[in-house]
Amino acid sequence: MNPHILVVEDEPALQFLIATHLRRQGYAVTTTGDVQAAQQALQSALPSLILLDWMLPGVSGFEFLRRLRMDERTRAVPVIMLTARAEERDKVAGLDAGADDYLAKPFSPRELVARIAAVLRRSERSREAEVLEAGGLRLDRASHRVTAGERPVHLGPSEFRMLEYLMANAERVHSRARLLDALWGHDAAIDERTVDVHIRRLRAALEPSGHDRLIQTVRGSGYRFSTEVAA
C-alpha cells in the first residue's frame, strides 16, 4: 500500500499543487483546509505522514501539532510543518513541539518530495524495535513512554527522539551535525547548539533516577549513550 499523506493547508492553490505532485509520486493524498477537517480525517484512519501549515484559520497548525503529540493515538505520526516563518526561533519552536521536519515557504515540489521521503525512512527505521532497554532505562516506541525502573520519565517530543536515537545506536559517538541530520534532516537549518539544549533537557529529566550518566559527552566529538560508565 502506498504511503498516505494528509495535507492540512488553507491556501487552495498551494494545496492543489502539493496534492498533484505527491500523487504523481505515487502517494495517496487527503487534503483539508483547517484543523476541524483534519481531525475528522484522522478519525477514520491515521496517515503515514501529515503536512501541516503553521498559519491556519481558527486553530493554528502549531497548536494542532501540540494536540497531536499529546494524543497517544497520533503522537507517533510524522509531521512536517509548512510555514512562511523562516526565522530560526520559529523553526526551533516547531521542532520542540514535535515536528519531524520544517519546510519554509516558498519551497520547490522536488524538495518537498525529498523531505517526505526522508522523514518516512526515519519513521520506518524507528519502528524496527518496539522497545529499547539499557541500564535500567526502558523506552517504548509504540506508547512513547520512558521508564527508569518503575518510575515514568517525562520527556518532550524532541528529547524523546534524542533518547530513542541514542539508545538505538548505543556505544557510538554522534557529532552534533549527525544528530541534527538523524532527528530533523540535514536541511533543518537550525544551529548545532540546539542539540546541546536538548541534551541538557534530557539529562535533567533522567537525573532523578541517575540515568543522566548514560548520556556521555565525548569532548571534541559529540555525544554517546553508554551503560559503561567510568568511575
Image (tube, helix red, strand yellow):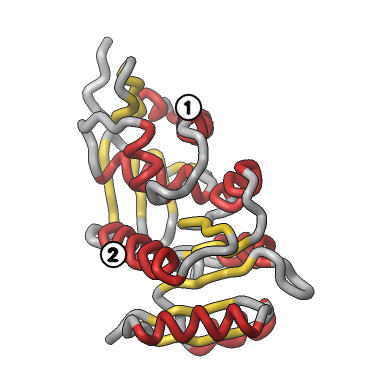
The residue labelled by disc 1 is: 207
In this orientation, does residue 197 appear?
yes
Residue at figure coordinates x 29%, y 41% from the top left: 167
Q: Residues within 10 Å of mark 1 (few under 14, many from 20)?
A: few
Front residue of 161 and 193: 193
Question: In the visual, does 136 lie left or right of 17?
Answer: left
Residue 209: percent from left, percent from top: 44, 30
Residue at figure coordinates x 60%, y 42% from the top left: 88
Q: Name which quarter of the figure residue 137 lies in.
A: top left
Position of residue 55 relative to residue 32, above or below, is above
Front residue of 29 and 189: 189
Residue 166: percent from left, percent from top: 31, 39
Q: Classify the position of the N terminus by image quarter.
A: bottom left
Eye-nearest disc, 1 or 2: 2
Q: Residues within 10 Å of mark 2 (few under 14, many from 20)?
A: few
Position of residue 171 relative to residue 129, above or below, is above
Position of residue 28 relative to residue 60, above or below, is below
SS of the residue under disc 2: helix
Q: Which mark is residue 75?
A: none
Q: Which mark is residue 124?
A: 2
In this orientation, does residue 205 appear?
no
Q: Residue furthest top?
A: 231
Residue 231: percent from left, percent from top: 27, 10
Q: Residue furthest bottom?
A: 44
Residue 179: percent from left, percent from top: 36, 39
